[in-house]
Amino acid sequence: MRFSLDLLVRLLGAIVGSIVLGIFGNSLAKTLGYSTDLFIVIFGLFGTISGFILTPYFTVRPARAIKKQLAVMPPEKLVALVVGIMLGLVAAALFSLPLSLLPSPFREVLPLISAIAFCYVAVLVLMMRNRDLQGILKNFRPSKTTDNVTRAEQDDFILLDTSVIIDGRITDISKTGFIRGTMLVPNFILMELQHIADSADSLRRNRGRRGLEVLTLLQQENPIPVQITDMDISEVREADSKLVALARHLHCPIMTNDYNLNRVAELQGVTVLNINDLANAVKALYLPGEELNVKIIQEGKEYGQGVGYLEDGTMVVVEDGRSYMNSSPNVIVTKVLQTTAGRMIFAKI
């Protein structure tokens, strides 16, 4: 389709170029007193070749670039762009009358220049203050219930990674009310989930299906809006790189529990909401000397040690706890160690 469109535009450009330059060659030949046929053939041939080669660079390719930008442009910026152009044209129309009274050539040139300048300034200002424009437009919306208005006013996006969808904890976190904004799931993330769900490996297939089920729950039961978007970065192929590039373009954070994606995104200046970090942060904090109750369920690595787990999954290593296997003694915290895998507590009877 792309090739046929390019070819059609090139043929039209060749026809228009040959006609325009042929007419120009005819006029030039009459002015110089030469044979018009020769000039028409030479200039017409030059116009045909030039039109065939150059036309796509002035028509199809700029249109494709604009289409790509519009596809990934946030809605509020798109509204600011349209409103800015309209305001710029209105201002230029008001100034066109006094400018038309100026002597030639100013009256022919200045109205066009003023239209371009007014549109540029208006778009620039509204792009910078697009949130203020949104606030003005919201005043004209029909009133709804408080809950619906709150949802409508969410204009911050949070991009979801494949790993955080498969993990599933996002459903419980979103119900707590700590997350604000719209959860955004790009189509390439959805396709990656589908690819995992279609895998020949049973483990990967189950993970992919779980991710699709979690996404369905998010859309049906989640109090926070969840939006599937066609936004894409066509220049990038790998899904994680696409996600980081899209987050940079939208100026929004990525929610993930993928360590590598976390580091890559942070290196590129993208805010990352890591669910594992959140889980560690909300675990109960115990200080040395505090007493707690834990059930010892297995032996430790060192002689005489016993190991148990708190309700939040925190490992507790109890000195001389081996003799208390399958019982729940009160222990005293001696040291708390924070690791990349989580928090570990050392205690004694």
Image: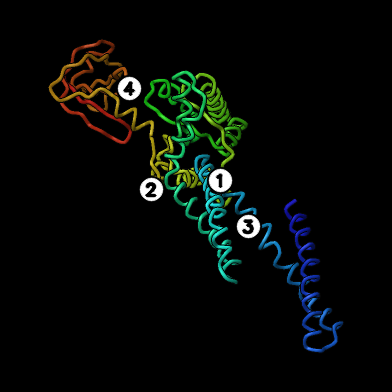
How busy is the neighbourhood of tag 1: few (under 14 within 10 Å), some, or many (20 plus)? some
Disc with the residue nearer the chain's start (4 vs 2):
2
Q: For mark 4, what is the residue?
A: 313
What is the C-alpha distance between the residues marked 2 and 3?
29 Å
CB atoms of marks 3 and 1 within 8 Å:
no
- The local secondary structure at tag 1 comes to helix
Of badges 2 and 3, the one in the foreground is: 3
Mark 2 = which residue? 269
User: Residue beneath label 3, please?
Assistant: 62
Picture quadrant where residue 285 is located: top left
Q: Amino acid at mark 4?
A: Gly
User: Depth-wise, is mark 1 or mark 4 nearer the camera?
Assistant: 1
**62 or 270, which lies in front?**
62
Q: Answer left or right for 274 relative to 58.
A: left
Q: Quadrant of residue 322?
A: top left
Nearer to us in this view, 148 or 10: 148
Residue 265 in the image: above or below residue 23: above
- Whole-percent x and y of residue 31? 78, 85
Asked whether the beta carbons under mark 1 and mark 4 sit within 8 Å of each other, the answer is no
Tell me the amino acid under the disc marked 1: Val
Callout 3 amino acid: Pro
Dot placed on the residue nearer the N-terminal end, 2 or 3: 3
